[in-house]
Image (cartoon, helix red, strand yellow):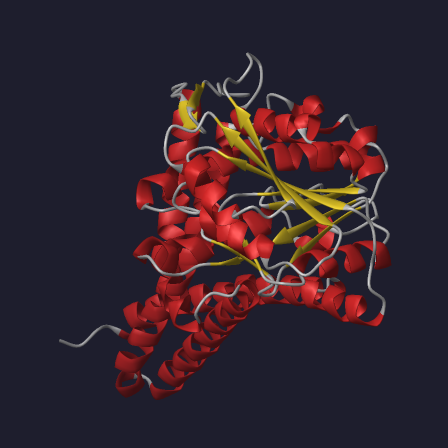
Amino acid sequence: MTIPHWLFETLGWILGAGAVATIVAWGLVAVLMERSVRSVPTLRAGAALARDDPPSGRVCVVIPAWNEERVIARVVASLRAETYPQLSVVLALDRCTDATAALARTAIDGDPRFEIVEIDACPPGWAGKVNAVHSGVTRSRAAADADFLLFADADTEFTPGCVEASLALMRQRRLDLLSLVPTLGYETWFERVAQTGAAFELMRQFPLRRANSMGNDRRAFANGQYMLFSRAAYTAINGHEAVRSALLEDLALARSIQSAGRRTGVFFAAGLLHCRMYADWPQFRRGWKRIYIESAERKPRRLLINAWRMRGLGVLLPLWTFGCGLWAAYGIAHDPTAGWTLLALSLLATAVWFGTLLRVCALIGAPLWTAPLHIGGAWLTATILAEAARDLRTRKPTSWGGREYDLGAEES
């Protein structure tokens, strides 16, 4: 069957436009990402600073834990291996009904740097994690004397030298709050397929360059998996008590720090801090929905816009580009000049898209072979965003940390 020349030409223009759009859109992503990389160091820079001039000051690490028997021994072991000399650790065990407490005590094995605070109830008006951290700070002997307060999640794993590197980078950049984006684990199918896309969307909303800016384009951001405060800054904003009801307390605290005119910094951990966020796919979906709902300030419309943007950038444009390449391969015999032009456009667009994804994977520590899976990951991430919007509009409660929360919606 011979395709009319006008039809071939029309489809060629349409498919070629998709390839051009891919080049422009993903090229812009690459440029913005490189700007961030060049302007924002990783924690490895802090490690070099610490070797030349070791930091000082008492650091108290507070780890909130609600039924964390799966990971509590690992984070304790990593903190016991930490080399920073002025370190103390508080485990704030929040209404645990599993073996978390017993496993924690076994892992601590009498290490005098560790202290356990057990929490029996969460007061009305408080989010569970926020109350756990607040209890750890206010009921701990070590926290009362600390110069720095470090809040980390139970599913993190410290590499020796992480704390010292953080303090050195914090000192060099004169920060009141330093936060890290940890190197994530990639062992399960959903981590390999969807995790890079989920993290990519959050980084799009909160670019590290803007999170570290002191100009008018600054966007407050912190990652609750690792937040290191100076005591003075934490006290000045009234700590976790000021954000008692926040389900995403890291963003709330970052905004408080910014409103107080103090400096924040967010950096890639570059292998000095690791994290396995979720044990299974339902937890992954529920956890990221909570993150996206709060980052969108509980606005369903904003979530839907983000979902369609994710589908367009991560699914439609790459598939459009592949279609252009297939049409070009067919069309070379029909119209060599147009066919080869379309093929060149398709190959260039694929190179820009795939090269940018390889760079993203390298930055966040994802295996490079997972880059082609981003199409599926982008679709799943967009689905999570759309589900989050629907949950808000239908007032579906979210379950987190042993409690249910009715998030409502800020707009219809």
Q: Is residue 350 above or below residue 258?
A: below
- Of 241 and 410, nearer the camera is 241
Horizontal arrangement in the rendering, residue 398 relative to residue 61 (left or right): left
In x, y percent, where is residue 140? 68, 31
Answer yes or no: is residue 345 visible: yes
Q: Quadrant of the N terminus?
A: bottom left
Residue drawn at (72%, 56%) of the image: 209
Residue drawn at (80%, 68%) of the image: 49
Indicate the quadrant where residue 11 lies.
bottom left
Residue drawn at (45%, 41%) of the image: 288
In x, y percent, where is residue 69? 40, 41
Horizontal arrangement in the rendering, residue 298 relative to residue 264 (left or right): left
Horizontal arrangement in the rendering, residue 20 relative to residue 1 (left or right): right
- Of 79 and 256, nearer the camera is 79
Residue extending furthest toward the left: 1
Indicate the quadrant where residue 126 lies.
top right
Q: Is residue 290 above or below residue 331?
A: above
Indicate the quadrant where residue 40 lies.
bottom right
- Of 261 and 27, nearer the camera is 261
Q: Is residue 8 above or below residue 289?
A: below
- Of 6 and 15, nearer the camera is 15
In x, y percent, where is residue 387? 37, 34
Residue drawn at (36%, 48%) of the image: 380
How many numbered discs sit on the rendered protein? 0
